[in-house]
Amino acid sequence: GDSVTQMEGPVTLSEEAFLTINCTYTATGYPSLFWYVQYPGEGLQLLLKATKADDKGSNKGFEATYRKETTSFHLEKGSVQVSDSAVYFCALSGLFASGTYKYIFGTGTRLKVLA
Amino acid sequence: DAGVTQSPTHLIKTRGQQVTLRCSPKSGHDTVSWYQQALGQGPQFIFQYYEEEERQRGNFPDRFSGHQFPNYSSELNVNALLLGDSALYLCASSSTTGGGETQYFGPGTRLLVL
């Protein structure tokens, strides 16, 4: 079945460091891919998405490219800030036969940025 | 434009009790999905409602049931609560006319079962 694998955390970086969080997926068909961010005590916020191969999603300095050949969607940011400290979830959309979608999430990667 | 709202924000119950959680979707959205997020884990799909019917279901027992109302709001009911039901319950809404792929999440209801 469809699945998402993320690198285990926590990831601890100094402010202004470069961030990479790895995400690979297994899916039938051509799912859309998403990154969500969860701040302490809150729900999930959509960070970025890509709907087809070679698409690059970007938002707030974060970006990720849909790589079909490596089935990956790694999250990157050139210079992290303390305010980026959160848990990041990679997800794919699975299409039901009914035509509706559900999300399959990775286990999340906790990022801690130190001043 | 209000986003997805959920109530209550926190809830404490004891084993064997029943609980009802509520969700109002984002304006213009007609599909509601429910997820369970255990501590330190990613969200797990419970079920999805569209046109007031349960359309898809994840690997959750029948103790978990739901409902969708004509105004697209939804309820999640859990009967005979177990300690293991303690989690953050997330509601997500989407629009079938918009393709349905992008889901917007509410802040969640944190349930603690003692």
Image: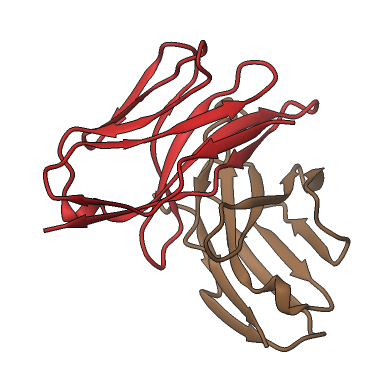
Chain colours: A red, B brown
Q: Is residue B15 left or right of residue A80?
A: right
- Residue pictured at 80% horizontal, 50% vertical: B59
- Residue pictured at 81% horizontal, 46% vertical: B53
Q: Is residue A20 left or right of residue A32?
A: left
Residue A59 in view of the camera = yes
Q: Residue furthest right?
A: B62
Quarter of the image for residue B76 reads bottom right
Q: Quadrant of the C terminus of chain B?
A: bottom right
Q: Is residue A59 left or right of residue B56?
A: left
Residue B72 in view of the camera = no
- Residue pictured at 50% horizontal, 51% vertical: B105
Quarter of the image for residue B84 reads bottom right
Coordinates of residue B25 in the picture (x, y in percent): 56, 51
- Residue pictured at 63% horizontal, 66% vertical: B22
Q: Nearer the viewer, residue B39 or A100?
A: B39
Please give the count of numbered marks on the rendered protein. 0
Can you say whether B54 is above or below A95 in the image? below
Coordinates of residue B2 in the picture (x, y in percent): 42, 54
Quarter of the image for residue B74 reads bottom right
Coordinates of residue B61 in the picture (x, y in percent): 86, 60
Q: Nearer the viewer, residue B106 or B58?
A: B58
